[in-house]
Image (spheres, rainbow, N blue to C red):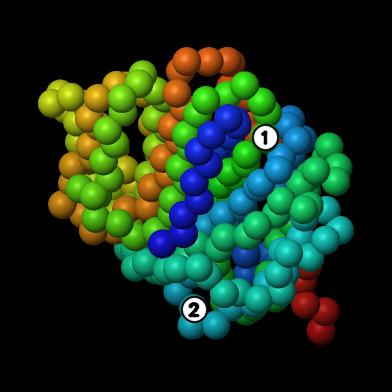
Amino acid sequence: MFSLEVNGHSKATLDCYSVMRILNFEEREVELALIRTHNYKKAIASVFVTTNNDYNSWILWINDFVITREFKPSLCIKSGLGKLCVFNYDISSLLNLSNFVNFRIKYTGTKSIVVNNLVLFGETGEPNYNSFYEYKIGPKIISDIKFDLKDRSIIKLLLLSGERQKIALRVNGEDREIKVGSQFEENELVAEGEVKLISSSNFILGFSFIKNLDKEEDSKYMLEKRKIMESSRRKVV
């Protein structure tokens, strides 16, 4: 389980970008071009990949800086499409170097993988915020996800499962239905009191983003999505 908590006078953002690109022997690269909208004192990038392979290799960049040359996931879970692997990187020292941010992956393996999503969490350090933010990732029994909110707050959930299903979100005893599948489903609500997710599934990946509404402002994306570019390189015989 990967976990990061920010508790105090600060502001944070949580954003999910859909990539959905197959990389293999012929299609080698994918690039996600973004524009930074804040300065960040802390930033985490999580990359989600589906694979059926025992061995994979890649290179991951932000702009001209190599983040990793190793395909070593933080964790993997089984799904109907193979193994869903998650990679977490601390990019705090890189994100503020330019207003234009390019995430680029070059796949150097032979069998196909699918790059599903890029999720970014960042703490801005802006003053005059009395907020609590929680960023967690990992296989989780869904009944364990529970919040007890003393103040009116925003909850932002990005949920994913190995199979398509419906789960219940219980707010102060009242159930709301949520659909969950192999792609992230974003759910956001304002609530106060007890909030609980109810399901029999043991394989859910969830992110929670909680903001006290004492000082609510219009939220902005951490990075503004501009374009997704693909390039392919074929083997020269």
* Residue 36 seen in the current view: yes
* Residue 176 seen in the current view: no
Residue plotted at (66% across, 46% down): 42
Residue 17 occupies quadrant: top right
Residue linked to disc 1? 125
User: How far separated are the C-alphas under marks 2 and 1?
Assistant: 40 Å
Q: Are marks 2 and 1 in contact (CB under 8 Å)?
A: no
Residue linked to disc 2? 53
Give the secondary structure at mark 1: loop
**Taking 121 as reference, is 224 above or below it?**
above
For the residue carrying disc 2, how many other residues have a C-alpha within 10 Å: few (<14), some (14-19), or many (20+)?
few
Quarter occupied by the N terminus: bottom left
The percent coordinates of residue 110 (x first, y second) are 62, 79
Give the camera-side residue of 237 and 94: 94
Q: Earlier in the sequence, mark 2 or mark 1?
A: 2
The percent coordinates of residue 236 (x first, y second) are 82, 79
Residue plotted at (24% across, 45% down): 165
Give the camera-side residue of 166 and 176: 176
The percent coordinates of residue 12 (x first, y second) are 58, 34
Residue 9 shown left or right of residue 231 in the figure: left
Q: What residue type is labelled 2?
A: Asn
Which residue occupies the extreme left position in the image?
A: 173
Give the camera-side residue of 224 and 30: 224
Mark in front: 2 vs 1? 1
